[in-house]
Image (cartoon, rainbow, N blue to C red):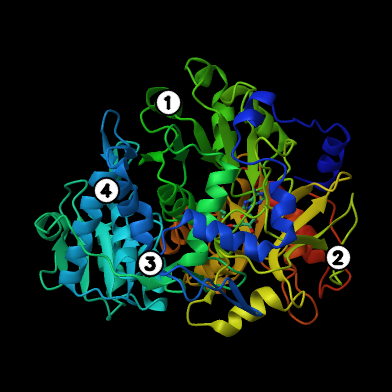
Amino acid sequence: MSETKLEAWLDETRTFVPSAAFVAQANADASIYPEAAADPVAWWGRQARERLTWDVVPSQNLEWNSPQATWFADGTLNASVNCVDRHVAGGLGSRVAFHWVGDIDGEAVSITYEDLLARVSRAANALVELGVVAGDRVAIYMPMIPEAVVAMLACARLGAAHSVVFGGFAAEALADRIVDADCHFVITADGGFRRGVATPLKPAVDEALLSCPNVRKVLVVRRTGEKVSWDPQRDVWWHDIVERQSSTHQPESFPAEQVLYVMYTSGTTARPKGILHTTGGYLTQAATTHYYVFDVKPDRDVCWTSADIGWVTGHSYIVYGPLTNGVTQILFEGTPDSGGRDRWWRIIEQYGVTILYTAPTAIRTLMKWGEDIPANFDLSSLRLLGSVGEPINPEAWMWYREHVGGNACPVVDTWWQTETGGIMITPLPGVTATKPGAAMRPFPGISIDVVDGDGISVGNGEGGYLTVTAPWPGMTRGIYGDPERFAETYWTRFPGSYFAGDGAKRDLDGDLWLLGRVDDVMNISGHRLSTTEVEHALVGHPAVAEAAVVGASDETTGQAIVAFVTLKLSHLGDEADQAALVHELRAHVASVISPIARPRQIILTPELPKTRSGKIMRRLLRDVAEQRALGDVTTLTDPTVVAMIDRLMAAHSGDDA
Ligand code: PRX
């Protein structure tokens, strides 16, 4: 949201206070904030001991040697036992862990905690047979099917780190991630379904592995039944090896700081970062935030987090948080319009979903389709709504509240990142008031500040940079294989504090509003992409001499990619050639990175605006892409370049949409 729009909104901000009925049954009450603030480290320590089952209960809480933290370091536990075994042992084996709902209408299966334990045990036994040992990294590249969760938990059970790569990434992006984390094993599927159409995954794995010599075994789930090519030395069908295993597996106990997973995310350079998470602190934050932010009642609630497990939201709020808390969930393979634009509402009605957690992009899409669609369904089971991934505009927030929540559900806008592991800023339902578009307050035990360029806290009514001023249990332990980049990226801008890369504002009541990224990271439909990553893909095309990429605001996707490209002289061609080339370049980016990264618009220009020191002025290009008044152009080598690009942009607006 633009500053002016925000100002206008703040003037007329509505505040929703919790209803008496919600307060009466809420997991948290107002005492939670002062209790946690009195001694945040001890408070997290109590959460860790209360919410998790430890084999050796930790005697320590935090060891802080900035920027390196360890939490509960002398404790030992097994993440998979915390997510599954202990619920079965506690008599909850017949509770449904997942109602899996397929992309294709009518395909569904409900998996109890007892079933899940048997499936995870079999998969763990199979991984042992394939040679996986504690400390290994295993890449998981799968559609949203139960085996994806089973694979993650089986790795965790063995003390092997998983690195889940979103199934929408292309072969090259997959290969980069496999090589960077030095994965020796890959778990995948022949393909998945998307709006009823079989979409292959195995061919991308085959192509990726041409440049991953260290991968020894590939475990393949048969999902679509489409023909795949096969390397008998390397490839193993899931149904051949997993199904014949014993359904019991004796888990080992691992130190709290055992690496649980690596998750790649975009930074400001072309190379994605492998964000490391360990076990004890991460699980503590995932479970605690899930319990309080979603006010979960494990014996009654049906939670639905609509994210893909290939992103951190899926890790923390489909797998580790909810399963640690022993709740029932929906696991949906499809898109909001798989099987019709009413699919989500049908699922909510059929399964009695009580808690829905999704992204503003999805809300805006559903909004575009019209409120008369949800109005046809009984959504009265819903009692809480959550949002994550990008700033939520007040209009979308209000629509969500009115047309999905029937004006009766608290809406929690939750800010966090891959690096933070769990939710950091959020209202607490039943305790905190909510305002449309605001993430409101730091979660108990989390210390946040908004500072100016010199690191000085801003006052109420002012904006600045979002920082975290004290360590927290779910914080990343670093970037895989690159400790210096970790310190440099997050801890040097404001010494002693973690710099998130986001702008934020405190309103006059001191409540927090997120304003989007302040660096070269774009947020497309809640997906993080760096401008340089897309530029890299563009200049990898033989026709491209130079490229500059910016994120421009977009009504549905939050931001959309606009690329400015100069061609090599040998590829200039005529207008028809250029139109074909633009088309080809957009497809090229999609095939190198992912369809998510496909530019909305590509503008071919003979020149890019550069400073005298040769730096491309992206700020000006952003102004052009958003049709704003241009900023200062005096430092440019040739100030007329921007006006020229502006004209080109106007002439081609709408070309590629
Ligand atoms: O810019 C912020 C935005 O998403 C970034 C983190 O992206 P990722 O690591 O992929 O994790 C997404 C899911 C947690 C942040 O730096 N972001 C996330 N949640 C919000 C948000 N921006 C505004 N409001 C939010 N609630």
10 Å neighbourhood of mark 2: few (<14), some, or many (≥20)?
some
- C-alpha gap between disc 2 and disc 1: 46 Å
Give the left or right position of residue 146, taking residue 586 as reference: left
Question: Does 324 sit above or below residue 449?
Answer: above
- C-alpha gap between disc 1 and disc 4: 21 Å
Task: Return the disc, 3 or 2, that comes first in the chain's sequence.
Answer: 3
Q: Which mark is residue 55?
A: 3
Along the viewing direction, whichever of 118 and 226 lies nearer the viewer: 118
- C-alpha gap between disc 3 and disc 1: 36 Å
- View quadrant of ligand 1: bottom right
- Kind of residue indicated by mark 2: Asp
- Kind of residue indicated by mark 4: Leu
Query: Label 4: which residue?
Result: 116
Task: Return the disc, 1 or 4, that comes first in the chain's sequence.
Answer: 4
Quick one: SS at disc 2?
loop
Query: Label 1: which residue?
Result: 352
Q: Residue at x 41, y 52 (%)?
A: 319
